[in-house]
Amino acid sequence: MDNLIEGIIVVAVLAGAAFTLVGSLGLAKLPDFYMRLHGPTKATTLGVGAILIASMLFFSPREAGLSLHELMVALFLFITAPVSAHILAKAAMHGDVKRNPKTRGEPWEQ
Amino acid sequence: MFAKLFPHPLFSALLAVIWLLLAASYSAGQVLLALLVGWGLPFFSSALWPRRPPLAKPLAMLGFIATVLYDIVIANVVVALLILGPSRRLKPAFVVYPLALEDRLAITVLANTISLTPGTVSADVSLTRHALLIHALNVEDEEELVRSIRERYEKPLQEIFG
């Protein structure tokens, strides 16, 4: 039983680390500002989520009661990550940041 | 009487739960404090809030959250593969999404959901709140994207917010 839980924790930590790494890679290698936004807003949500699951599984048997405050980290992350992405995109449109020439459609003027 | 004491019952319950989770302890004292915060904050601040109708179907929210969580997992795998693949094959696009929702909170929830799910970030809301501007990382067919957002997220939100 302990081995099984430890196995799940290991998989969750590794998967979390992998997704966070890919998110950061996206930030480094994608061609324009708007596309780079996608890396950190998404790949990292699952990355952090997996690490939080691992943390809950690891700490619950070691401390009194279930360890649930990780849920708060997830909640605040899910609320704030899209908002910061939205503001960054808005600021970029306002500042007329260069876009990848293949981008279809235009940001509107207002 | 009840409505006076608890102007936002759902909000009260949420606050109490968040308090307990943040305190990370379920002793009698903390439970008491949680109840106090859950009752007091909405009660004393309700005069400052815009009047809003209660959710039409609060329970449908659970189904919506489940759909979104599932989509977040899929989105992450899809975006990870797109990032690892060659960048020149990506087809980024700005897509204008015509909104059917009118409630401000509902539009906020929809915009946040769009940002959390497959390859799309909501970039702006039109001044009249009739459309969202979405940036997509890789999109073949804009109409298909609009249709899937309408079916998967906007329609359930319309039901929840009534």
Image (tube, coloured by chain):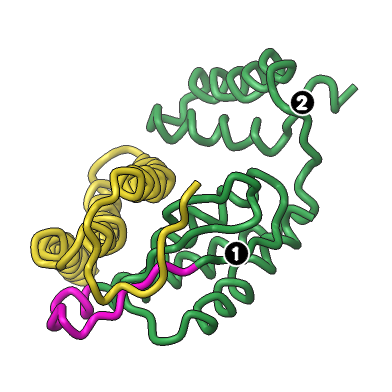
Quadrant for residue B32, please give it: top right
Tell which of A19 and A93 is nearer to you. Answer: A93
Which of the chains is yellow? A
Of tags 2 and 1, the one toward the viewer is 1
Residue, x 77% and y 56% (percent of image)?
B57
Q: Residues within 10 Å of mark 2 (few under 14, many from 20)?
A: some
What kind of residue is marked 1?
Answer: Phe
- The residue pinned by badge 2 equals B6
Q: Position of residue B111 (x, y in %)?
A: 51, 55
Would residue B54 be counted in the magenta stretch? no
What kind of residue is marked 2?
Answer: Phe
- Left or right of B111 in this view: B80: left
- Left or right of B31 in this view: B136: left
Q: Position of residue B157 (x, y in %)?
A: 67, 60
Looking at the picture, does residue A78 appear above or below residue B34?
below
Q: Are marks 2 and 1 in contact (CB under 8 Å)?
A: no
Per the rendering, the mark at residue B64 is 1
Residue, x 22% and y 52% (percent of image)?
A58
Tell which of A18 and B104 is nearer to you. Answer: B104
Which of the chains is green? B
Q: CA distance from mark 2 to mark 1?
A: 25 Å
Tell which of A102 and B56 is nearer to you. Answer: A102
In the rendered image, the residue lying farthest to the front is: A109
- Left or right of B52 in this view: B155: left
Quadrant for residue B148, please give it: bottom right
Looking at the picture, does residue A38 appear above or below residue B47?
below
Looking at the picture, does residue B151 appear above or below residue B25?
below
- Left or right of A5 in this view: B144: right
Magenta residues (range):
B80-95
Instruction: Name the subunit of mark 1.
Output: B
Image quadrant containing the N terminus of chain A: bottom left
